[in-house]
Amino acid sequence: MYPVLFFIFAGLAVAGAISLLVQRQPIYSALSLVAVMGALAALYLLLGAEFVAAIQIIVYAGAIMVLFVFVIMLLNAQPAEAPGRSRVARALGYPLLGILIAELGGMVAAHFQNVKLTSGEYVVHVAQIGDALFRSYLLPFEATSILFLAGILGAVLLAAHTEDEAPGKLYIGEAPPEPNLIPYDSTEGSTTYNGAGQPVRTDLPAHPSSEEVRS
Amino acid sequence: MIPLSYYLILSVLLFCLGVAGFLLKTDVISIFISIELMLNGVNLSFVAFSHFLKQINGNIFVFFVMVVAAAEAAVGLAIIVSVVRNRHTLSIDKISLMRD
């Protein structure tokens, strides 16, 4: 029974990860990741980690992914246009990814094929988790709470609205050109005009004339 | 029973697909989602080792990874929101500079 369940949920997880990679809309990628997390929670249950399976569903799929989906919908994220990658990158990237997977998988298979570890009935109860968390891992636990507080403050500060910004339209592709992007336009030097009425830039070093060079 | 190497190979697959998404995607949010996929792949190997070694430490590590991932998601999404509010784009090619 366990092997069947393992292969079902492992296949679900890999299919969700591939779907995450292939989808162009960010919202579909996020929902694929929710599917991966559900399959992983089932695998955690097979491994006897009940608490981890529960917080995988509650915290990861329930809280973090909802945050992602909120932000995706808030920003009205559209699929990005296909990037113009170089031909070398396209020809080398996918084979190198395959080599990475084969290398890591082969290493794992070679090193852990003959591991004498029996997978008996080992179920981690919540009481054991709490015991370890508040005895031997008490200091990391408290440090984590301080990290969380800092994270909350940082998130609020970063995302806080300021009044002088108008809510702008979101552009995925080419952003509209803004007037002050060229650095020499923003210098405070006065603009001078030559005889024909054309503006002359005064902030650039003038070319030395040929008489100055000679003397 | 399922041997340990099956779980580890599944974990490697998920991690590598996360790496591929991180490198191939072009909008910031999909890249962030790929990072979460990599964290999930590592979590699976933690739980598998915890089960096969019959020690509880792997489960505790997964707990800490999840907590750090939650904080990272909150701060990262806040950064994305403020960047998009200033630049009006999600494409990483358009936000390659840290200054305006």
Image: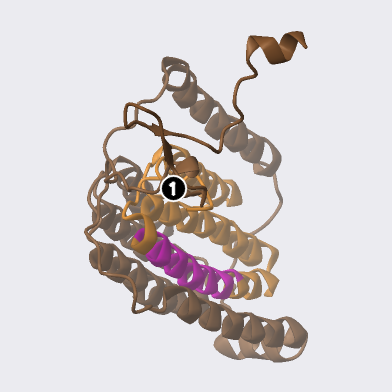
Chain colours: A brown, B orange
Query: Where is A74 relative to A163, above or below?
Result: above
In the rendered structure, the answer to whether residue A135 lies left or right of residue A63 reads right
Report the amino acid beneath label 1.
Ile
In the rendered structure, the answer to whether residue B54 lies left or right of residue B82 reads right
Where is residue B43? Give x, y as percent.
56, 61
Q: Around disc 1, counting alpha carbons within 10 Å, would you say few (fewer than 14), some (14 to 19), or many (20 or more)?
A: some
Q: Which of A92 and A85 is in front in this view?
A: A85
In the rendered structure, the answer to whether residue A64 lies left or right of residue A177 reads right
Residue at image coords 63%, 15%: A209
Q: Nearer the viewer, residue A63 or A38?
A: A63
Q: Is residue B66 magenta?
A: yes
Where is residue A111? Give x, y as percent.
70, 40
Query: What residue is pinned by disc 1?
Result: B95
Q: Nearer the viewer, residue A172 or B60?
A: A172
Where is residue A102? Give x, y as percent.
55, 30
SS majority, magenta? helix
